[in-house]
Amino acid sequence: MPTSRRLTAVTEGHRVTTLELFFDLVFVYAITQTVQLMSDHLTLLGLGQGVVVVAVLWWCWCAYAWLGTTVRADEGAARWALFGAMTVIMLMALTIPEAFGDFEGGLYAPLLFAVCYLLVRLLHLVAYLGAAREDPELRSVVLRSTAPGICGALILAGAAFTGGWTQLGLWVLALGIDYVGVHVAGARGWRVPAPGHFAERFGLVVIIALGESIVAIGVGISTLPMSWLVLLTSGLALSVSAGMWWLYFGVVAHVAERRLTTATGEERVRLATDSYTYLHLPLVAGIVLLALGMKKALLYVADTEHYPPGAALHGVALWAMTGGLALYLVALSALRRRNLGGWNVQRLAVAAFLLAVTPALELLPAAALVAAVAAVTAALVTFERVVLAQRRARLLAH
C-alpha cells in the first residue's frame, strides 16, 4: 500500500501525537461557543440546549480518540480523516449559536449542524473500516456502533425544522439512540492496545475543558474596567479551576490509568468505555456549566454600569455554577466506584452540600459567591491532602 494511504497499528508504548493535540484545538473553540450559547440564552431551555451540544461534541471527540488508539492518527489515511473531521467540527462550532434557532439570512444553521454531525460520523466510519481491513471482528463492531449514530444524525436533521422543547426532546432522543447503541454493541471487537495513550488523551481533554473555563472568565470581562475586586474575584475563580485539576489529577487519573493498564481483553475495553467514554462526559459537562456560572459572576462584578454593587447571581447562572461543580464531584466519585468498587463519600457529601445551600447563596453578592465556592473547593482539597494522605498512598501503591 502506498505510504500516503497506509495505516499504522498502535503499539503498547504509543503516546499522544501532535496532530491529536491540534485536533483538540477545534474542540476548545466548540466548547467556547457552547458556553456563549448558554450565556446568550440563560433559561432552563437554553441550559438544556447547551448540555446536549456538549454531548454531541463529546461523542465526536471520543470517536476519534478511539480511532487514535487503534491506528496512528498522524500517519496515512487516518491523518486525512482527522483533518477532514477537524474541518467539519469547525463548521459545527461556527453554527452552534444558531443550532436551535437560525439567524435571518444565510444558510439554515440547524440543518447544517446536523449534516456536519453526519459527515463526522461517516468520516470516522471510513477511517475505522480502513483500520479494521484485516480484523473482521473490529469491522463488525464498528458497523454496529455507527448505525445508531447515523440514525441520530437523521433525527437531528428532522429536529432542525422544529423549535423549543420539542426540538430539545428530539436532540435527547437522537443522542440516546447513539449513546445506548454503542453500549448495546458491546465490548467484543474493540481494541485498546495502548492504554497509556488512551488515558492520556482523556486527561488532556479534561485540561482543555478546565482551560476553557479560565478563558470564559477572561473573555467575559475583557472589555470592562479593571478593579481590585475584579482581580480578587478572578483569582478566586482560578483557584476553583486549580482545585478541580487537583481533584482529578491528584488521584483519579492515576488510578483509572493503572486499572486500564492492568486489565486485558474485553475487560480493558469495558473499563475504557465506562470510565472514559461515558463517565468523562459528566466530568466535562460539569466544567462547562461551572464556566458559565463563573463567566456570569465575573460579569456582575466587573460591569458596574449594568449591575449595581453587590449584585447577586441567581436563577440558572447560580445553579450552573454550584450544579456544575456538584456534577463534577459526582462524576469523580462514580469513576472511583467503577475502578475501585467504592464511592468517594466526602466528594458526594460536598456535592450534596453545594446543592442544598444554593438557594441561600442567592443572598450573597457575586464576588462573595465565588469566594464561597472557592472556599468549599479548597476545604475539600485540604481535607483529602491532609486527612486522607495515607489512604491515597496505599491506593496508588496497589
Image: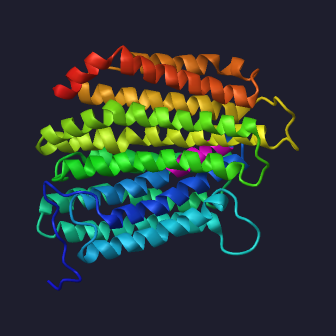
What residue is shown at x 42% (from left), y 45% (from top)? 206
Looking at the image, residue 48 sits to the left or right of residue 195; the answer is right
**Image x and y of residue 117, in percent:** 47, 63
For this orientation, the residue located farthest to the bottom is 2
The C terminus - image quarter: top left
Reply yes or no: does residue 43 show up in magenta: no
Residue 173 in sight: no
**Image x and y of residue 394, in percent:** 20, 21
Tell me the magenta residue range.
46-54
Residue 25's place in the image compared with 180, above or below, is: below
Residue 265's place in the image compared with 71, above or below, is: above
Residue 333 in sight: yes
**Image x and y of residue 353, in percent:** 55, 16
What residue is shown at x 54% (from left), y 58% (from top)? 30
Quick one: 225 or 279, which is closer to the camera?
225
Majority SS type along the magenta span: helix
The N terminus - image quarter: bottom left
Residue 390, quarter of picture: top left
Looking at the image, residue 228 sits to the left or right of residue 166; the answer is right
What residue is shown at x 63% (from left), y 42% (from top)? 292
**Image x and y of residue 177, in percent:** 42, 48
Looking at the image, residue 91 sits to the left or right of residue 108; the answer is left
Quick one: 99 or 380, which is closer to the camera?
380
Quick one: 344 or 192, which is closer to the camera?
344
